[in-house]
Image (cartoon, grey):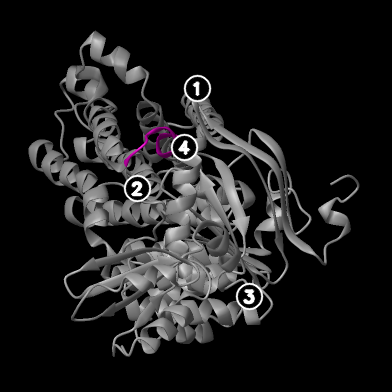
Amino acid sequence: MTGQHPAQIPGERAVAVRELAKVYGPLRAVDGVSFDVRRGEIFGIVGVNGSGKTTTVECLQGLRDRDNGEVHVLGLDPATQRDALRHRIGSQLQESALPDRLRVWEALDLFAAISPRSRDWRRLADEWGLWEKRRAAFADLSGGQRQRLFVALALVNDPEIVFLDEMTTGLDPSARHAAWDLVRAVRQRGTTVVLVTHFMDEAEELCDRIAVFKAGRIVALDTPSALVRRFADHSTVRFTHEGDDLPWLDGCPGASAVEREGTRFTVAGDGPLLAYVASALVAHGIAPLDLRVERPTLEQAFLRISEVEATTR
Amino acid sequence: MRGVRKLAWVEVKLFIREPLALVFAFAFPFFMLFILAGVFGNDIDSTDPESVEVWRGVGPSDYYVSTYVGLVMASAGLITLPLRLAGYREAGVLRRYRAAGVSVPVVLGAQVLVCIGMAVVAATGIVVTSTLLYGTVLPANWALVLLAMGAGLLTFASIGVFLGAVLPTARAVQGAGLALFFVMMMISGSGPPRDVLTDSMRLVSDMMPLTHLNLLLQDAWLGFGWAMDQALITLAFAVGAALLAVRFFRWE
């Protein structure tokens, strides 16, 4: 990385982190983390609770001082250029609140007034489904409504980069999917998104690249599909069949294990497994109606990454 | 600047929406007014030198009216202001404000402005009530009284921010702030006159900022002049508390 100071190439990297470390007493909460976030991408940070995700993004936002390492966000150092950075980034914090009796419109109006640059909060309220609730007090909002309000507040200053920390926690499934669409729309407007989440489906659905945190370190960093390929490259083909065992299934290219429980068959393996299993079945005159393949998910990759790390430690 | 104004206005609205906080914070000075005016009235036996000395030569209600103004300020600084600051920190409101780029002076400035405004309203209410109901005297020297009020507001605003900065939770404020408030209410001149306190009580009383503020206000109100010693001591409390507040303020 010699001579590649992020401030000198602002067009490429929104965030550059080198050897970031944060210690709380004996706990190394963040222990030498390095990564870049490209402009315009949705960058995911996943990991179990206590793996250092939130501490890392707090250091990036200037909400916490780091103990070691270099951090540049939009070419600025959040530790020393906090004020200059503040108005160019949006923050949705994991644990925060508003005064109980503050109304939705007042919060949006206030946060818009604080920032030198701001979007029309009425449109934001509308986009995030808060318009109907604009006169409601914060204390009277449901968990999901609060969460949406916090995201809207993070966007009211029209930030170049927005940090979303567990944005969809507390949202019901339909609200989550609506929130995902909105995050994509945020990115369409050119905003870089750093998304902290412990929902793997969310990370897989939204993120261009994902950093997997474990015990204060990054143990994997890649696109969701590359992570799945690398750590969970196996498929499972399932179907039901009444009758004898099907020993010839073992001969399908890529198949590694065939299991039978009553009438339910499971073939595990790699590569284009479904095609081979289907062709073998048809060749033997069997055409199950429920033949299907289950592709590995990021969640499986994540569990696998955690296991691998555990055994190599 | 737009931010401070808006935040202060929002805080005013929040304050009004929680009338309980308002009643609680400013009820005690009114209780004292009604109870002590009922007990002592506003007449003294001018032939009894002891009585004249205890009440500084004026009627008890005249003696007390300025001290209730001091008490209102103490209640703002010892209860209202720290309760809001600590409550906001506890709930994560300060954290949320900070992430949005609100600076410490803006947060504290808005809170202090609102508390000062509320204290002025409550003090006015006390004076109007006392004048109308009990016929107590108005300030002999308005300029000095306003100056003393300014010193009092400054001092208790600083103390309020200091308490809000060091007390971690709203619960802690309810304990420590209320305890301080009641001690001051009883022995700083708003309760039994200073002259009837025991020596040890007077010693504690001398360490309380409200004691000095009350004397400052009382002298100005009754036309006894400007108590420079008391003014300096009051301002010393203001500066000390402000420095400690800046030193210890935490967002979370």
Say which quarter of the image contains residue A307. Answer: top left
Magenta segment includes B22: no
Question: Mark 3 is on which residue type?
Answer: Ser
Q: Which residue is mark 2?
A: B87
User: Are discs 1 and 4 located on one and the same chain?
Assistant: no
User: Are discs 2 and 4 located on one and the same chain?
Assistant: no
Question: Mark 4 is on which residue type?
Answer: Thr
Q: Residues within 10 Å of mark 1 (few under 14, many from 20)?
A: few
Output the chain of dot 2.
Answer: B
> Which numbered dot is residue B229?
1
Output the chain of dot 4.
Answer: A
Residue B218 relative to residue A275: left or right: left
Task: Identify the residue shown where x is 54% and y is 40%.
Answer: A216
Q: Residues within 10 Å of mark 2 (few under 14, many from 20)?
A: many
User: Are discs 3 and 4 located on one and the same chain?
Assistant: yes
Q: Which residue is mark 3?
A: A118
Q: Position of residue A283 (x, y in %)?
A: 40, 88
Q: What span is colored magenta in the figure? A: B162-169
Camera-near label (2 vs 3) is 3
